[in-house]
Image (cartoon, rainbow, N blue to C red):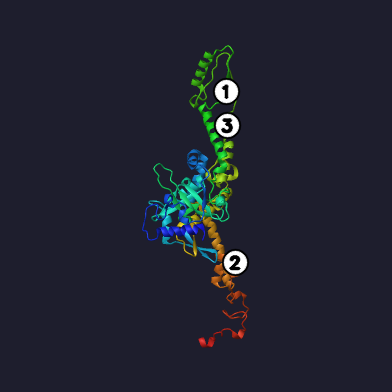
């Protein structure tokens, strides 16, 4: 019996015969009373994985401060949150139709006044900023666990000194430790009590995810610096930065008075465009260029495209300058960018989150938790493509049935894309039968074995 099985068995013994308890019992264990002695006399050592970045720092310093990052996260969130959850049947390993059961109510109303869109918005926000999103269930409702308060706990029995790097290392659970003032308890949750969504695995960790923002922090710093530089240009008059040379005979007191007068009459955006008057001995030399000659659009546009690439969002979808110029706005190019965003970014995210949340929802044995994108306005072109595909399938089914294959096997073969599933009925289309053969007779039957033609005399 492995560590995780023994933890689960101990959990069952601890909660046997107990009714509905508070937060820490039975679904949440108070670590002050849990610890490791309940595992028995075997040695155990655990290793922990916490989120790598400063979650609050990413929120205040990036999400709430940088416009391109906010725009990218909003596009991902708005499209991601439009999906609805359904069950999808699996037949012989192949996907089947979508259906719903009352168990999906938990995802449709995850908490009081909450919707599926609210749940998905929270999940994608946490995953974008922290690389991980955690959801658990309590009292028939879902609860979001703040990712920087969650620690992934691993353990190894055979090689405790290797911690999570041992060959038999197991995911033991999740340690939830609220860090607000007044919090007095930590809580331990088993793996089957937590839906862990980590769409980008961290190569340096076993179970922890990584934020897509982490690799482009330098690009974000550059964008913030460029924005600050533009503000500085406006703050200093929106005019070229200059060097003013004065005669050597000017005293420090005279220089101070001259500088104060210059700042008062020519510094700041309100004084932009005023004529500059100088007294004798003063010489003005421009040092830098104005905003047009500095080409901020090109400099920042290139940085925005790098951010969009890391987020998996084409610049034209989010409205960045480089995506709104040249041939990018052509209908074909926009459609290709849109398809790339949906197929390469959103669908893997939907597939991952459905698999993660399946931990908390009773899934029928012949099905899997899936998403339903048929009502997403952003995917209307995909709906037209699906209609074309279904039309092609229908034509194929018609041709195969006319060719004598059984309808049931034809549908199965077309849906599974496996022609070896076809079964022939032994009957052929009329056009394939020899001349003079009665309709309904098999082509391999002798003429005398077929149905007897009607006698016109008897009919009269």
Using the image as rendered, state which of residue 96 and residue 428 is in the foreground.
Answer: 96
**Res. 326 image quadrant:** top right
Looking at the rendered structure, the secondary structure element under dot 2 is loop
Which residue is the site of mark 2?
418
Return the mark for residue 292.
Answer: 3
Residue 176: horizontal and vertical position, in percent?
A: 45, 49
Return the mark for residue 272.
Answer: none
| CA neighbours of label 1 inside 10 A, class few (<14), some (14 to 19), many (20+) | few
User: Is label 2 in contact with label 3 (beta carbons under 8 Å)?
Assistant: no
User: Which is more N-terminal, label 3 or label 2?
Assistant: 3
Kindly identify the residue that appears in the image at 52 percent across and 29 percent down: 232
Residue 254: horizontal and vertical position, in percent?
A: 52, 13
| CA neighbours of label 2 inside 10 A, class few (<14), some (14 to 19), many (20+) | few
User: Which is more N-terminal, label 2 or label 1?
Assistant: 1
| CA neighbours of label 3 inside 10 A, class few (<14), some (14 to 19), many (20+) | few
Looking at the rendered structure, the secondary structure element under dot 3 is helix
Label 2 and label 3: CA atoms lie apart by: 61 Å
Label 3 and label 1: CA atoms lie apart by: 17 Å
User: Which is more N-terminal, label 1 or label 3?
Assistant: 1
**Is the residue 233 above or below the residue 245 in the image?**
below
Using the image as rendered, state which of residue 133 and residue 423 is in the foreground.
Answer: 133
Q: Is residue 207 visible?
A: yes
Return the mark for residue 242.
Answer: 1
Using the image as rendered, state which of residue 75 and residue 326 is in the foreground.
Answer: 75
Looking at the rendered structure, the secondary structure element under dot 1 is strand
Residue 119: horizontal and vertical position, in percent?
A: 44, 51
Q: Residue lying furthest bottom in this view?
A: 458
Residue 15: horizontal and vertical position, in percent?
A: 40, 58
Q: Is residue 124 visible?
A: no
Label 1 and label 2: CA atoms lie apart by: 75 Å
**Is the residue 315 above or below the residue 426 in the image?**
above
User: Is label 3 in contact with label 1 (beta carbons under 8 Å)?
Assistant: no
């Amino acid at each position: 019996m492995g560590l995780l099985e023994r933890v689960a068995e101990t959990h069952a013994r601890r909660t046997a015969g107990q009714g509905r308890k508070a937060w820490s019992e039975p679904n949440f264990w108070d670590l002050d009373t849990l610890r490791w002695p309940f595992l028995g006399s075997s040695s155990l050592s655990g290793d922990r994985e916490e989120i790598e970045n400063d979650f609050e720092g990413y929120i205040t310093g990036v999400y709430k401060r940088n416009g391109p990052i906010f725009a990218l996260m909003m596009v991902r969130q708005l499209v991601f949150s439009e999906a609805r959850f359904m069950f999808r049947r699996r037949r012989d390993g192949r996907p089947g139709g979508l259906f719903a059961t009352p168990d999906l109510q938990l995802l449709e109303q995850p908490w009081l006044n909450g919707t599926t869109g609210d749940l998905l918005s929270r999940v994608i926000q946490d995953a974008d900023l922290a690389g991980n999103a955690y959801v658990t269930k309590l009292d028939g409702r879902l609860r979001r666990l703040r990712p920087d308060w969650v620690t992934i706990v691993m353990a190894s029995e055979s090689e405790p000194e290797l911690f999570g790097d041992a060959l038999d290392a197991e995911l033991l659970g999740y340690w939830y430790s609220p860090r607000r003032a007044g919090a007095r308890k930590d809580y331990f949750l088993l793996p089957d009590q937590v839906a862990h969504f980590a769409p980008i695995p961290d190569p340096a960790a076993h179970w922890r995810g990584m934020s897509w923002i982490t690799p482009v922090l330098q690009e974000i710093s550059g964008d913030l610096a460029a924005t600050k530089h533009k503000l500085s240009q406006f703050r200093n008059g929106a005019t070229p930065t200059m060097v003013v040379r004065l005669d050597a005979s000017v005293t420090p007191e005279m220089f101070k008075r001259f500088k104060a007068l210059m700042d008062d009459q020519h510094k700041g955006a309100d004084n932009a465009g005023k004529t500059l008057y100088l007294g004798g001995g003063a010489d003005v030399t421009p040092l830098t260029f104005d905003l047009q000659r500095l080409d901020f659009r090109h400099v920042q546009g290139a940085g925005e495209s790098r951010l969009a690439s890391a987020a998996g969002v084409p610049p034209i979808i989010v409205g960045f300058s480089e995506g709104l110029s040249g041939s990018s706005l052509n209908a074909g190019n926009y459609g290709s960018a849109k398809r790339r965003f949906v197929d390469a970014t959103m669908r893997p995210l939907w597939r991952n989150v459905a698999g993660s949340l399946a931990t908390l929802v009773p899934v029928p044995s012949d099905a899997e938790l899936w998403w339903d994108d048929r009502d997403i306005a952003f995917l209307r072109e995909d709906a037209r493509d699906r209609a074309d595909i279904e039309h092609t399938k229908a034509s194929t089914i018609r041709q195969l049935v006319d060719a004598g294959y059984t309808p049931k096997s034809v549908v199965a073969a077309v849906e599974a894309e496996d022609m070896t599933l076809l079964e022939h009925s032994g009957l052929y289309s009329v056009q394939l039968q020899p001349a003079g053969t009665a309709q309904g007779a098999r082509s391999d039957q002798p003429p005398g074995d077929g149905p007897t033609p009607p006698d016109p005399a008897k009919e009269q």
